Image (cartoon, coloured by chain):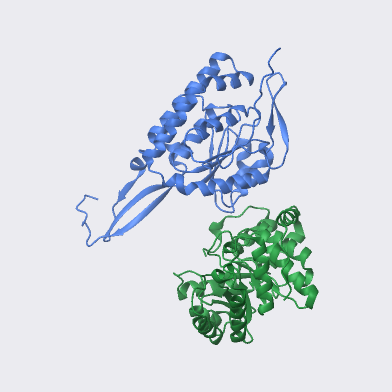
Chain colours: A blue, B green
Amino acid sequence: MKRIEVLKTYKIYAGGKFPRTESGRYYLALNINGEPIANMCRGSRKDIRNAVVFARRALGAWSGKTAFNRSQILYRIAEVLEGRKSQFIEELILQGMTKSSALKEVESSIDRIVYYAGWCDKYCQIGSSVNPVSSSHFNFSTYEPVGVVGMIAPQDTSLYGLISALMPIIAGGNSCVLLANEKMPLCAVTFAEVLHASDVPGGVVNIITGHISELIKPLATHMDVNAISISNLPELKREIDLYSVDNLKRVRSYDVNWNSKGNQALHYITDFQEIKTTWHPIENIGGATSTY
Amino acid sequence: MSLSPTVDKVGVEERVSRFQKRSIKTSAKMDGLKLVLNMIDLTTLEGKDTPGKVRQMCYKANHLHDSFPGLPSVAAVCVYPSMVKLAKSMVKNSAVKVASVSTAFPSGQAPIDVKISDTKFAVDQGADEIDMVISRGKFLAGEFSFVYDEIAQIKEVCGKSRLKVILETGELATLDNVRKASDLAIHAGADFIKTSTGKIQPAATMQVTYTMLMAIRDYYDETGIMIGMKPAGGISNSKLALHNLVMVKEVLGEEWLTNKWFRFGASSLANDVLMQILKTETGKYQSSDYFTID
């Protein structure tokens, strides 16, 4: 008798768990020939709300980890993804890629994770400064994560873009609520399983699938979301800017080709950092005997 | 005093789960949320309480969120006896009452004369309401008349101040005990019965609150006298508070839906309700960054 294949139920990822959407709604993900390949959760504003609560709750512990430890965890994501390459390649092919380009996409993604893993314990020194002041203070500026970041995954790639935009956010100690690629959502959900198996604490990354058009409003108007990352979606920029006004969210809108090897850089991390300047009283000017 | 009936735990769970399935939306939700605010006993009962902390809380009692007009004040502030005088001076000329815990709160492990002078002190300082704890050790040991006499003696000291009797249901182990303690407190002279001190978990679960409401209802059916109810501890979000209101309305009726007869003992609930009210009004999910730190 022919064995019946066990198909995967694609669900959202929130607070370190894989629930179905609170709304009970679904939509079909199609391949390039227009044939259905999976039922995806059609997330609702309540899913966004819950995810933001999880992200806020996870933020303290994640940003409070040592930079070195965050680096190890990011490297672990790369390790686990390496071990599950074939599954991602299959999904990419299902979504219309050739085998060789799928392999290239997955391998480049892994390399990109390793790149940002390396930055975790370095970006802070590079961007920080000791500032000359003309009073009896030791004055220095350093980075702090901006907080909960809402991210709309690039809609032109399934995995590479998602990883390229997400890794700098979490490398910098932020937590994230991520809207997956609407038409090619499979890799996002499978990547959630990779995160789940990589010591990334639950709630640091939350992944919601669904219609971008109905989910950006609750995400971008949410007062507890501190920044928004979008890439290659210039048509949404103005709408998101307007939604973000009330709590002065930082909106970073990229127009980049994430598939290019060169599009990885320190500034993608520091785009989601706040600068904190400390005035530390000292006894007399020049008391630190440095040349500042 | 008639014997307390035994409590059907499975039945209680079933009934309580139905209260939690009600969907309350739009204007009913808004009215409910405002009513919840108006029923809160804003509470600070920490060893580290300072006059500054109490002053700040008392200010909040009358100014929940000034940028949003039309909000009620809370029902009362609840503090330790040493803070009553200060709290009283802060909320004078407003509808906010001052409640004081007493009788060696939270353990109640002190001789009766200490408990009496503790209560007398709070009343003399101007407390409108007294939240006493029962002797749970004695209750569990079966010394019901000891517990009864204690409550009756404290009631006498209270004079015009209303007496809330805290059962500390988290230490009573069973719903049968909760029912028994409720009946005992009501017959001994409690104006209000209250679930918990907030220092022990579990605190005000809906099962426990339901059991106590049933005791109140049976007493009312028998005598026509209304007794108040105050769940305290663990009610930290709006949804749970609204479910509690549904339960009160369906078990006791609308007469109980005022802060004269129903209170929430809570510290963090107020901000969650405020955030819900603003969400309902603006359509935008709110952040605790823009509300007071309690």
Residue B26 rendering spot, x and y as whole percentages = 75, 57
Residue B147 rendering spot, x and y as whole percentages = 59, 75
Position above or below: B33 against A213:
below
* Residue occupying the point 57% across, 63% down: B171
Residue B146, quarter of the rendered image:
bottom right
Position above or below: B263 against B20:
below
Position above or below: B251 against A212:
below
Residue A232 rendering spot, x and y as whole percentages = 57, 32
Q: In which quadrant will I find the N terminus of chain B?
A: bottom right
Q: Is residue B130 visible?
A: no
- In the visual, does B89 lie left or right of B75? left
Q: Is residue B9 visible?
A: yes
* Residue occupying the point 59% across, 82% down: B154
- In the visual, does A72 lie left or right of A235? left
Residue B196 rendering spot, x and y as whole percentages = 59, 66
* Residue occupying the point 42% across, 31% down: A75
State the residue in front, A256 or B75.
B75
Position above or below: B159 against B135:
below
Residue B48, quarter of the rendered image:
bottom left
- In the visual, does B247 lie left or right of A257? right
* Residue occupying the point 54% across, 77% down: B102
